[in-house]
Amino acid sequence: MIQVAVFSDVHGNLPALEAVLNDIDQRGIYQRFCLGDLVDFAPWGNEVIERIKSLNIPCLLGNHDERIAFDLPVSPLSKHSAEETEARFVAIDHSKKNITTANKKFLSELPFHLQLNYKTGNKHWSIQLVHSTLERNDTYLYESENDEVFVSMLEASNTDMIVMGHTHLSFKKQIDNNKWAVNCGSVGRSKEENRLASYLILTIEEDHLVPEIVQIAYPIEETICGIKESDIPDYYAAFLKNEKVLIP
């Protein structure tokens, strides 16, 4: 048996990241992977990057990482309200101004996706890690997608499981016997009702794969206070409390 932990979308939320890392450590899991989006929306973008670097955790290039690394323009998203659109521009600008040159360089060198191969007994299992899809890191794929969407990704990568993040909504979907599409959710900015930090534990056996979504509490008030004490809009503090806020 092999166990692997996969997490994604920390978004500068260091207290949430530390809680997830501690939980993984307590379970004795040593294989850890991050699917990207280390920055934006909470004030510890540099600290999160440094933590990932210090632990040598393989990490992918999320769409927010890419924007900060290469100073890409911010485009409004149709799914966002006017309040979130305004807050988003300010929060991303905060990262552009505060992420260090060295950390921007680190982000710029992250791989776009990563394929893992594990051997258990006589069986080789292939696991495809992406931030969003094989081609893009900003496409939103949800559990409600037609199975053919995920079948196509599995066939294109020639893998048994594809693990993604980006949407901040976790799911696990079995596709024909031992094929899986899994979203590990978000560590630092969950869009699920409970707002808990979410990650994936993947147990690899010789004859099957077992994905488990783990959701844990973290000192969310520490993150809320950190946001309020920074130049990041209070919109993101209210979001973590599952409240709505109007931007003046």
Image (cartoon, rainbow, N blue to C red):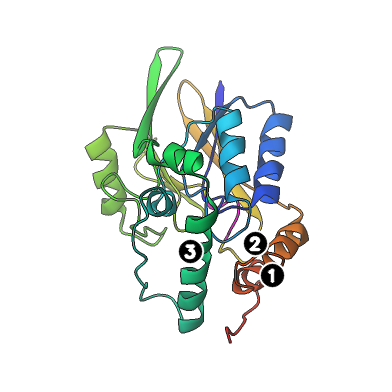
Q: Amino acid at mark 1?
A: Lys
Cβ atoms under marks 1 and 2 closer than 8 Å: yes
Per the image, the residue denoted by label 1 is 241
Q: Is residue 248 above or below residue 160?
A: below
Residue at (74, 52) in percent of width and height: 218
Camera-nearest label, 1 or 2 = 1
For the N terminus, the quadrant is: top right
Where residue 131 sits: x, y (%)? 40, 46
Q: Range of the magenta residues? A: 185-190
Q: CA distance from mark 1 to mark 3?
A: 23 Å
Residue at (27, 53) in percent of width and height: 149
Q: Is residue 172 above or below residue 209?
A: below
Per the image, the residue denoted by label 3 is 93
Q: Earlier in the sequence, mark 1 or mark 2?
A: 2
Where residue 171 sits: x, y (%)? 49, 53
Q: Is residue 214 above or below residue 74?
A: above
Where residue 183 sits: x, y (%)? 46, 49
Q: Nearer the viewer, residue 144 or 165?
A: 165
Q: CA distance from mark 1 to mark 2?
A: 8 Å
Which quarter of the figure has residue 75?
bottom left
Q: Which label belongs to residue 195?
A: 2
Residue at (36, 30) in percent of width and height: 115
Q: Nearer the viewer, residue 222 or 185?
A: 222
Secondary structure under tag 3 reads: helix
Q: Is residue 36 visible?
A: yes
Secondary structure under tag 1 reads: loop
